[in-house]
Image (spheres, rainbow, N blue to C red):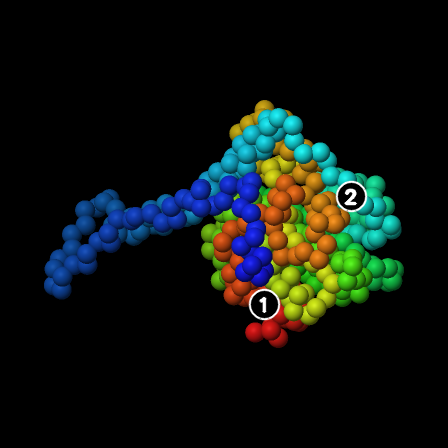
Amino acid sequence: MPRSERQSVRAVQPVTAAALSLPLGVGSAAAPRPPSPGAETHTHRGAPGPRPRAEGREAAMSLLSRALPALRLYCIGLAVALHQLLRRLRPGGAPAPVFPTQNGNVAIVTGGAKGIGYHTVKHLARLGMHVIIVEFLHCDLASMKSIRQFVQQFRAKNCPLHVLVNNAGVMLVPERKTEDGFEEHFGLNYLGHFLLTNLLLETLKQSGTRSHNARVITVASATHYVGRLHLNDLQSRCSYSPHGAYAQSKLALVLFTYRLQHLITSDGNHVTANVVDPGVVNTELYKNVCWATKVVKWMTAWLFFKTPEEGASTSIYAAVSPELEGVGGIYLYNEQRTKSTDVSYDEELQRRLWTESCKMTRISDVGSRDL
């Protein structure tokens, strides 16, 4: 994203991670001093030695490593929900935007059978788009083989592709792996869409024109503000936290979008890539939260959460708004340009994640040529 573009971006709406920063380290007791040479060591029978204490510290650190991501995630979620409530209570409000008809343009929406994806599909179809729904349980985004088969079937139709909406995802699933052995949040939410986009990119390039760019819209969330990208442990093997894994996958999607736009711009193609934040939306994604959270959600969602239709509004705006014609590499929330977390603009991190993702999905790293 060009520096001038970043400076013009207005930091609106979501509460940034800086306002919710939490301590990332804790103090620990000093290690016991080793006995001097020749000194005798006496241990009473039944008294704990150094090893039990070390194991206790390791257990405490392991518990903390799981608790902190959850705390960060719920803090950012609460902040966004409160902001949505205040926005809803404001008098008046902007009228619903009116978008131009799409004249049979073709769109692919992942996860389009329910939730935000369903309402995105419904609205795009009303505008005259031919929409192909990719639901991750059918065209399995957790399977590299399934994604490649879907792309082959789509290409066989010899039709253009004007809009790709990377919407499908999972949230807070227990530790498990995809068919290809990837941690599920990272494998489905991020790598699945990374591969799908790259395999469809040539079709998008051929479909875009100077006056009507093809568009890639990727759905992230405010949880990316508290995400930590662990390049040495993208599969969360060291210490699994469903909250941390989910937030990491959403941060990866933001980094991916900015890198994709950089590569598209370098090649001079008529495609734009943007990332959207739907807000806190009342969908089935919350089925894996604990029972207490489910009770709170059941009692308060009507007031604090967006409806799926409201959550889809920014995806629709990014897909068809004339205001975004030729504009890429931006983060959108409530149909407005918003600043994403600072680390997401780190171009070296974007490049390294892209390179590693190419290795994982076994595609050529076209981005390496501009190094």
Residue that label 2 marks: 99
Quarter of the image where the N terminus is located: bottom right
Mark 1, other Cα within 10 Å: few <14 / some 14–19 / many ≥20:
some
Q: Residue at x 59, y 26 (%)?
A: 89
Q: Residue at x 25, y 46 (%)?
A: 48
Mark 2, other Cα within 10 Å: few <14 / some 14–19 / many ≥20:
few
Q: Is residue 276 above or below residue 201?
A: above
Quarter of the image where the C terminus is located: bottom right
Q: Which mark lies nearer to you, 2 or 1?
A: 2
Q: Is residue 117 visible?
A: yes
Q: Residue at x 66, y 65 (%)?
A: 265
Give the image location of residue 153, x and y in percent. 83, 60
Task: Tell me the SS state at disc 1.
Answer: helix
Give the image location of residue 15, x and y in percent. 51, 41
Q: Is residue 142 above or below residue 270?
A: above
Give the image location of residue 186, x and y in percent. 59, 54
Which residue appears farthest toward the top when viewing the image? 299
In the rendered structure, the answer to whether residue 48 lies left or right of residue 314 reads left
In the image shown, does 13 or 109 lie closer to the viewer?
Answer: 13
Q: Which residue type does callout 2 highlight? A: Phe
In the image shown, does 152 or 161 lie closer to the viewer?
Answer: 161
In the image shown, does 166 or 241 lie closer to the viewer?
Answer: 166
- Label placed on residue 355: 1
